[in-house]
Amino acid sequence: MNGKKWAVGAAVAVMLLGVGGASAGGGTGAGPGAFGREAAQSEIRTAAAAAGLSESESLKREEAAASPSAATERDRLAARAAACTAAWGYFGRVVDGARGKFDRTVAALAEKGWAESGKRFEEKIDDSGGTSVGVTLKKNGWTLYARHHAPKAMEMDVISFQATEDACMNGFSEREWDVLFGEDGDAGD
């Protein structure tokens, strides 16, 4: 199931924001004074903006245009997952100093109490010097996957911060994960 949880972090900005998750209410811990979805979203956006990163306009438009209606079981499950997800992303042309801005965003999140969990990874992804870096952070029952992919051969940056509320995500059955991502954990249909 851990691989499937990671798939949620990787796919949520693209798939779940398109079904209304970005404007959904907080997850199970969103009571008064609790650290919930809005708090996680605010911390991510504030840290990214302070580091000089700008969210992709296409993601902002998808978030604003998202419809709360869910026609299929998969749509309803995606909306449920999105309600306990805070996501920020940039997909596009190379950003000047992107890696440093990514690192500053992670540092700002750490200052807000997000603690690194596990090992940070960095690997070469193409023969032109492109890299992929990732770190997992935890705070108050939330897990945040921070990723920066910079494929030099494609001349682009992909930066994402995907936080999910652990208790909420643990509430999905294996069958529901299979409906969302297929039996092999793939986010495709």
Image (tube, grey):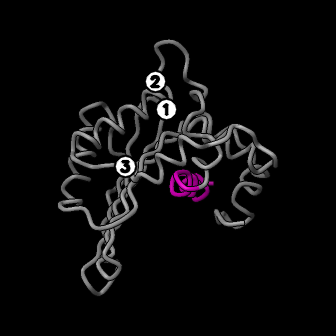
Question: What is the C-alpha distance between the residues marked 2 and 3?
Answer: 23 Å
What residue would you read off at disc 2?
Answer: 35
Dot 2 surroundings within 10 Å: few (below 14), some, or many (20 or more)?
some
Looking at the picture, which amino acid does disc 3 mark? Glu
**Where residue 114 sits in the image (x, y, percent)?**
34, 36
Question: What is the C-alpha distance between the residues marked 1 and 3?
Answer: 25 Å
For the residues bearing labels 1 and 2, Cβ distance under 8 angstroms: yes
User: As drawn, is 184 to the left or to the right of 126?
Assistant: right
Looking at the picture, which amino acid does disc 2 mark? Phe
First reached walking from the N terminus: tag 1 or tag 3: 3
Q: Please report the residue visible at 61 percent of the width from the left and 35 percent of the height from the top.
A: 83
Q: Please report the residue visible at 66 percent of the width from the left and 63 percent of the height from the top.
A: 185
The vertical placement of 173 against 27, above or below, is below
Q: Quadrant of the N terminus?
A: bottom right
First reached walking from the N terminus: tag 1 or tag 2: 2
Label of residue 55 in the image:
3
User: As drawn, is 91 to the left or to the right of 16?
Assistant: left
Residue 26 falls in image quadrant: top right
**Where residue 182 sits in the image (x, y, percent)?**
73, 63
Q: Closer to the observer: label 2 or label 3?
A: 3
Which residue ends up furthest to the bottom in the rendered image?
127
What residue would you read off at disc 1?
Answer: 141
Q: Decide whether the magenta segment is chiefly helix, strand or loop.
A: helix
For the residues bearing labels 2 and 3, Cβ distance under 8 angstroms: no
Q: Which residues are magenta?
A: 1-14
First reached walking from the N terminus: tag 2 or tag 3: 2
- Secondary structure, mark 1, is loop
- Secondary structure, mark 2, is loop
Dot 1 surroundings within 10 Å: few (below 14), some, or many (20 or more)?
few
Label of residue 15 in the image:
none
